[in-house]
Amino acid sequence: ETGVTQSPTHLIKTRGQQVTLRCSSQSGHNTVSWYQQALGQGPQFIFQYYREEENGRGNFPPRFSGLQFPNYSSELNVNALELDDSALYLCASSFIGGQGSGYTFGSGTRLTVV
Amino acid sequence: DAKTTQPPSMDCAEGRAANLPCNHSTISGNEYVYWYRQIHSQGPQYIIHGLKNNETNEMASLIITEDRKSSTLILPHATLRDTAVYYCIVRVASLTGGGNKLTFGTGTQLKVEL
């Protein structure tokens, strides 16, 4: 059973650019969520995808968007990058279909915006 | 999701039990208590969860008070590798996914020392 893998592990972008982060879900999971974690803070929920559609969103602007593919892998896209977007971006997969489902997180992508 | 309160930091001697408290006085009847931990520069790791009964697995034990307003995560024999930020989270287990997000606070930084 493979876990959640994210790529790239580190990334440096310039303010105003666009970035795409990728995530492969754990085998057997059908839901993927993305979180942003600023330094010294807990992860903050960005959005969740289920059946290839956004199914819940946190307090993030529309320039944060995503995709989920038929194989349950996912992308997070951020347009018009701002300095405050510098953070660790975490992907988590889970299985919807039963109560108390746990999440499996990847190790994250460290994004630095300069 | 109900709000949780945790002490910002705790110390524990290696080999001793680490008892991490969490207050969730506004928890609803259908909300579970989840515990995750995050070792530096890694994604959060699921530890344990419960609804109202005490739970135990290979990693830890979860003790939930009878009124469900607080809980304690117990690491029975803490090691240096247990040094991490521990998050207590309460949430509804939704079958459709819309409420499946995790709301992280700032957690408890547990430091295990020799």
Image (cartoon, rainbow, N blue to C red):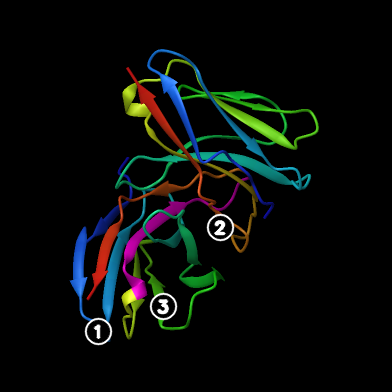
How far apart are the alpha carbons under marks 1 and 3? 13 Å
In this rendering, do the residues under marks 1 and 3 share a single chain?
A: yes
The three-letter code of the residue at mark 3 reads Phe
How far apart are the alpha carbons under marks 2 and 1? 28 Å
Q: Which residue is mark 1?
A: A17
Q: Dot 2 surroundings within 10 Å: few (below 14), some, or many (20 or more)? A: many
Q: Secondary structure at mark 2?
A: loop
Left or right: where B52 falls relative to B40: right
Depth order, front residue of A93/A63: A63
Q: Which residue is mark 2?
A: B101
In this rendering, do the residues under marks 3 and 2 share a single chain?
A: no
Asked if the residue under mark 3 is in contact with the one under mark 1, i.e. CB atoms within 8 Å, the reply is no
The three-letter code of the residue at mark 1 reads Gln
Depth order, front residue of A46/B111: B111
Q: Is residue B33 above or below residue A55?
A: above
Q: Would residue A77 be counted in the magenta stretch?
A: no
Q: Is residue B76 above or below residue A8?
A: above
The residue under the point 37% across, 69% down is: A69
Residue A94 appearing in the image: yes
Q: Secondary structure at mark 1?
A: loop
Depth order, front residue of B96/B27: B27
Image: magenta residue range: A84-99
Q: Which residue is mark 3?
A: A64
Percent position (x, y) of residue B51? 69, 36
Depth order, front residue of B66/B95: B66
Q: Secondary structure at mark 3?
A: strand
Q: Is residue B94 above or below residue B111?
A: below
